[in-house]
């Protein structure tokens, strides 16, 4: 726990950078016109449900991955910590990959790809008996589960162009918090049936996210019924 103090310095540094940036923005005399387009609440609600499901999967992995490595795979606590590090490092890469994919193929297709790709990665991780080989699979899980992360926030703002703060607060704040509220239920499951039952449950929970992703529409197509967004 004492090692967490190491993160104080970069946090303070980034706070200073953001503060200076905000000061420069406040001093500029640029008139910003916020789009007053109508909100597309139906696809936004689908997006929110998807974000909650993705959050449960990711936070569940964060919480129980080390215990899974120790209790089920028979690894040392150190190797369990390595597994969690690999998951989070894959998450960083997945966020970057998701941004590049969104630029190339669009946000909706990127979310669909990430939500679909995480299912076989999770299943393979659950079925692998070796804690060493499972490190490769947990990296794949970290990448795929985070591909939609930043894209969901942007899509939420596109669906509610006149309410960017509300969109970001729901997709980035409320959805993640709601996912965290469900993690204690996974803890009860782990107490009764072991951490392998938690991993199995996370595999199942990844499926509704992939299904919900099929109902997303491109922001430009939302007003005309979303036909183009489902192509």
Image (tube, rainbow, N blue to C red):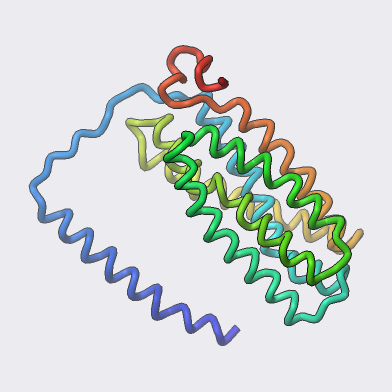
* Relative vertical location of residue 170 with respect to residue 66 in this rendering, above or below: above
Q: Identify whether 151 is placed above or below 3.
A: above
Can the viewer see residue 170 in this picture?
no
- Residue 223 lies, in percent from the top left, at 43, 16
Q: Is any atom of residue 16 visible in this view?
A: yes
- What is the tally of numbered marks visible in this picture? 0
**Residue 132 image position (x, y, % from top left):** 79, 71
Closer to the camera, 161 or 143? 143
Which residue lies at the image location 63% right of the left edge and 57% below the top edge? 142
Q: Position of residue 193 (x, y in %)?
A: 91, 59
Q: Quadrant of residue 221?
A: top left
* Residue 138 in the figure: left or right of residue 192: left
Residue furthest top as drawn? 224
Asked whether 195 or 137 is in front, the reply is 137
- Which residue is outermost to the bottom? 2
Q: Quadrant of the C terminus?
A: top right
Q: Quadrant of the N terminus?
A: bottom right
Q: Residue at x 63, y 46 (%)?
A: 54
Q: Residue 17, percent across and down?
A: 27, 68
Q: Residue furthest left?
A: 29
Q: Residue at x 51, y 47 (%)?
A: 98
- Please tell me which residue lies in front, 92 or 22: 92
Residue found farthest to the right: 193
Q: Which quarter of the figure has residue 84?
A: bottom right
Relative side of 66 to 59, left or right: right
């Amino acid at each position: 726990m004492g090692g967490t103090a190491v993160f104080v310095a970069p946090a303070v540094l980034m706070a200073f950078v953001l503060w200076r940036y905000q000061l420069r923005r406040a001093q500029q005399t640029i008139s910003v016109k916020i789009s007053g387009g109508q909100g597309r609440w139906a696809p936004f609600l689908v997006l929110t449900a998807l974000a909650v499901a993705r959050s449960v999967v990711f936070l569940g992995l964060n919480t129980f991955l080390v215990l899974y490595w120790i209790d089920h795979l028979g690894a040392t606590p150190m190797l369990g910590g390595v597994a969690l590090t690999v998951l989070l490092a894959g998450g960083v890469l997945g966020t970057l990959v998701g941004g590049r994919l969104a630029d190339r193929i669009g946000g909706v297709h990127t979310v669909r790809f990430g939500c679909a790709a995480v299912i076989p990665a999770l299943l393979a991780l659950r079925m692998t008996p070796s804690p060493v080989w499972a490190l490769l699979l947990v990296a794949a899980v970290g990448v795929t589960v985070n591909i939609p992360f930043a894209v969901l926030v942007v899509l939420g703002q596109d669906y509610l162009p006149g309410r960017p703060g509300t969109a970001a607060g729901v997709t980035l704040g409320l959805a993640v918090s709601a996912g965290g509220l469900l993690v204690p239920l996974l803890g009860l499951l782990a107490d009764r049936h072991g951490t392998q039952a938690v991993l199995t449950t996370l595999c199942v929970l990844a499926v509704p996210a992939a299904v919900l992703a099929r109902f997303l529409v491109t922001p430009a197509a939302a007003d005309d019924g979303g036909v183009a967004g489902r192509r």
